[in-house]
Amino acid sequence: MTAAAAVDVTLRAPAARDRAAIERMLRDAAVFREDEVAIGLEVFDGSVAGDPAYHSVVAELGGGVAGWICWGPTPCTVGTWDMYWLAVSPAVHGAGIGTRLVREMEQRLAGRARLIVVETAGREDYAPTRAFYEARGYRRAAVIPDFYAPGDDQVVYVKSFTPSTDSYEGR
Ligand SMILES: CC(C)(COP(=O)(O)OP(=O)(O)OC[C@H]1O[C@@H](n2cnc3c(N)ncnc32)[C@H](O)[C@@H]1OP(=O)(O)O)[C@@H](O)C(=O)NCCC(=O)NCCS
């Protein structure tokens, strides 16, 4: 399936009942270490609890969770936001769900974000993920060698926006 053949997902706020499905999805992605899954769930819990540091959206397909995105204002910045998490169920990769979630985040931040930052890995198994961000207008801004572990670089992507007001949120 190609991203063009997007499936009809419903985007909605996360709920506590989604936690097990989110956990399964993060494990099934097969790129996140156990400690990363634990942090992902902490962030998920924060977004469900209404913590303003974490905003998230769930993609629902056929009554189940098919994707999840989470973002928040980057502390100590003016108008910079971090996309913290993005995952789509492997069974429906390539169906346009990741694209819908990124677009939804960008639309919700329209007029509020000046810069969206995505940190990802430079490992070979992340090559499709990096291609995904690059095709969606995210520009490689930095590489920190050996950031996550020896031989496991961090790649920082950024996308710039023009806020419609001159007062930025996220500070
Ligand atoms: C990266 C990811 C979120 C993309 O979501 P998706 O719903 O599969 O992507 P879409 O269908 O919207 O878009 C398909 C595009 O993503 C790329 N892609 C990345 N990973 C892919 C995968 N595993 N399967 C299919 N396409 C993938 C394709 O090359 C395609 O590119 P194109 O449209 O420019 O040709 C998803 O594959 C995923 O969850 N990966 C594992 C977890 C991960 O890496 N999360 C991000 C951590 S920073």
Image (cartoon, grey):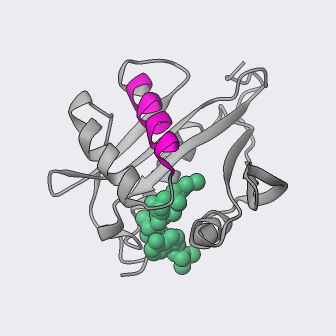
Query: Residue 64 in the image: x percent, y percent?
Result: 19, 51
Query: Which quadrant is home to the N terminus?
Result: bottom left
Q: Nearest the camera: 5 or 34?
A: 34
Quarter of the image holding residue 53? top right
Quadrant housing the C terminus: top right
**The residue positioned farthest toward the bottom in the image shown:** 1
In the displayed structure, would residue 101 be above or below residue 53? below
**Relative to 23, is 166 above or below?**
above
Main secondary structure found in the magenta portion: helix
Q: Where is 13 relative to 98, above or below? A: above
- Residue drawn at point x = 41 percent, y = 80 percent: 2
Q: Is residue 57 above or below residue 31?
A: above
Q: Which residues are magenta?
A: 33-46
Compared across the picture, whether 167 is left or right of 21 comes to right
Residue 38 screen position, x and y as percent: 45, 36
Q: Residue at x 76, y 56 (%)?
A: 150
Pick out the residue farthest to the left: 63
Comparing 9 with 14, the one in front is 14
